[in-house]
Amino acid sequence: MNLSRLALSLGQSATLKLNELANNLKAEGKPVIHLGGGEPEEKIPGGALEESRKMLDAGFVRYTPVSGTAPLKKEIAAYTEAHYGVKPGPKNIVVASGAKQAIYNFLVSVVDPGDQVIFPAPYWVSYPEMVRLAYGTPVIVRPPKGELLVSAADIEAHLTSCTKAILLNSPNNPSGQVYSEEFVREMVEICEHRNIYLLMDDIYNRLVFDGLKAPSAFNFSQRPLNDSVIVSINGVSKTFSMTGYRIGWSVANEALTQAMIKVQAQVSSCPSALSQTAAAGALREGSGFVDKLRSGLEKKRDVMVAELSKLKKVKLHKPQGTFYSFPDFSAYEPDSTKLSNMLLEKAMVVTVPGMEFGLEGHLRLSYCGAEKDIVEGVSRIRKILD
């Protein structure tokens, strides 16, 4: 049987592949330490657990409207107003089965064959393949050597008449860097002037440290929401430690939102009713859970930075958010895939090669697990490399 050219052209998600590998090694009893994951170890919020139990006790878990339930949309609207400075209506919101599906809904809704979608490196591993799934062309903008952030001028230099959208992830996976207010303002101005979509992947937007805040693109817009080129993507997976519930959402103008609803209706119908109920409970609970999670991650960030500083040749930009670090190991081995494989074989530590994020020579090391694993994992790496 033949496979489609599209299917054959797609790469496998490196992060999901490594998650599976780590779990398999642990199941075999191997002393593996997983520094490549993206799941906080904290339990889900009490509000999410309570609402899940209520629905299960009632015994009715049914289909929901394609774009999401009214109670969850109400909570998303309040959350967006509180943290983004704009209040969307129900017709501006699509609840999806994870932020990844929300991004896919957007891409399929706006990209035609031949259209270009721009995003800076380092980027989340799925961006290039998702653009290709929508029959678009990914255009990658790389930062200056030794840096992890591009400038607005760098991105503007790559714009063409075929550019349909720009994707930004801040705080950034894998680097943990936060784009400045000036940069976000410039990107909004450029996109509004050229009528190009600006998708803000905000899945980590509240997991920021050192008193920083991830700027909201809506704060710099000169347009009302229903005429806006800005699309905000968020969800409960990271900020509320609810990865397994698979709930994300988009906030966009009504016309684009209606197109994304049609796409989702044909792809997955609707998100899980149980997951939506839990997500509404988490959002309704307020900021206490998020503040505690963020504080714990900041402490783990400091542990990771302290341990990495003990390596003689590692270069590191201190993460400003998320739960990832992206140190440069090129002085040891410029081939990040080769280095990652060697560390797994000799140190039993799972890392993610920087090549998968568009920057060779780096490794992504996660610090969302236990502190003892961070210390032991980096210690094992140091023993091998130094």
Image (spheres, rainbow, N blue to C red):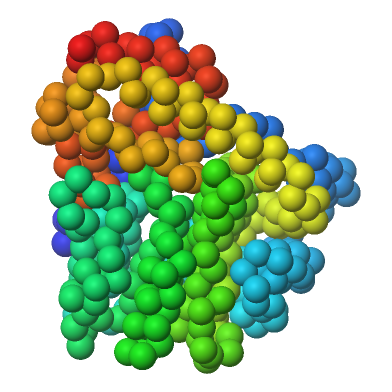
Foreground of the two, 50 or 314: 314
Q: Is residue 160 left or right of residue 344?
A: left
Count of marks placed on residues? 0
Residue in the picture at 56% in, 34% down: 297
Residue 187 in sight from this viewpoint: yes
Residue in the picture at 68% in, 45% down: 290
Q: Is residue 8 left or right of residue 89?
A: left
Residue 63 spot, x, y in % from top left: 69, 63
Residue 251 spot, x, y in % from top left: 57, 73
In what quadrant of the picture does the C terminus appear? top left
In the picture, residue 57 is in which quadrant? top right
In the picture, residue 117 is in which quadrant? bottom left
Residue 129 in sight from this viewpoint: no
Residue 101 spot, x, y in % from top left: 47, 61
> Height in image: 238 above or below 311?
below
Residue in the picture at 49% in, 45% down: 321
> Height in image: 124 above or below 264?
above
Residue 261 spot, x, y in % from top left: 55, 77
Q: Is residue 176 left or right of residue 341?
A: right
Residue in the picture at 19% in, 83% down: 160
> Height in image: 8 above or below 108?
above
